[in-house]
Image: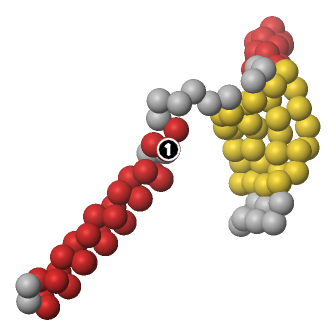
Amino acid sequence: MDPVRYISAIILVAALLALAIWVLRRFNVAGVGVPSRLKIVSHLSVGTREKLLVVRFGNEDVLLGVTPHSITRLGAAPAGSADNEAEKFRAELESRS
């Protein structure tokens, strides 16, 4: 095998590996077929590298503050309680109009 074909084969394999990694990350394929008790319900960026996450764990929604150096639990509520509060607020607004 001449050097050009050898280097071309290495470049092709590296490109295919990079493409496979990108597809797995882009489409979150890591957990396919495996039921998870964790689910990111909502997220909000509050800075360049900081964000707030609402993570559903079992029957509880947990609010997490995430920075590059730490993850802090900020609060918790029963799962879906934020949805109930939003519905109550919407109904209150509709009743006033």
The answer to whether any part of residue 3 appears in the image is yes
Q: Secondary structure at mark 1?
A: helix
- Colour treatment of the image: secondary structure
Quarter residue 63 falls in = top right
| In this picture, residue 30 sits left or right of residue 89 | left
Q: Residue at x 22, y 72 (%)?
A: 12
Query: How far across and down, in percent of the image, does residue 29 sit?
Result: 45, 43
The answer to whether any part of residue 86 appears in the image is no
Q: Residue at x 57, y 27 (%)?
A: 35
Q: Quick one: which residue is furthest to the bottom in this view?
A: 3
Q: Identify the image quadrant of the C terminus.
A: top right
Query: How far across and down, in percent of the image, does residue 80 sit?
Result: 76, 20
Q: Residue at x 82, y 45 (%)?
A: 64
Q: Amino acid at mark 1?
A: Ala
Query: How far across and down, in percent of the image, does residue 88 sit?
Result: 82, 14
Q: Identify the image quadrant of the N terminus.
A: bottom left
Q: Quick one: which residue is furthest to the front in this view?
A: 1
Q: Which residue is mark 1?
A: 30
Looking at the image, how many numbered discs can be counted on the residues?
Answer: 1
Depth check: 30 or 47 in front? 30
Quarter residue 10 falls in = bottom left
Query: How far across and down, in percent of the image, does residue 96 sit?
Result: 83, 12
Q: Quick one: which residue is furthest to the right in this view?
A: 75
Q: Is 73 placed above or below 77 here?
A: below
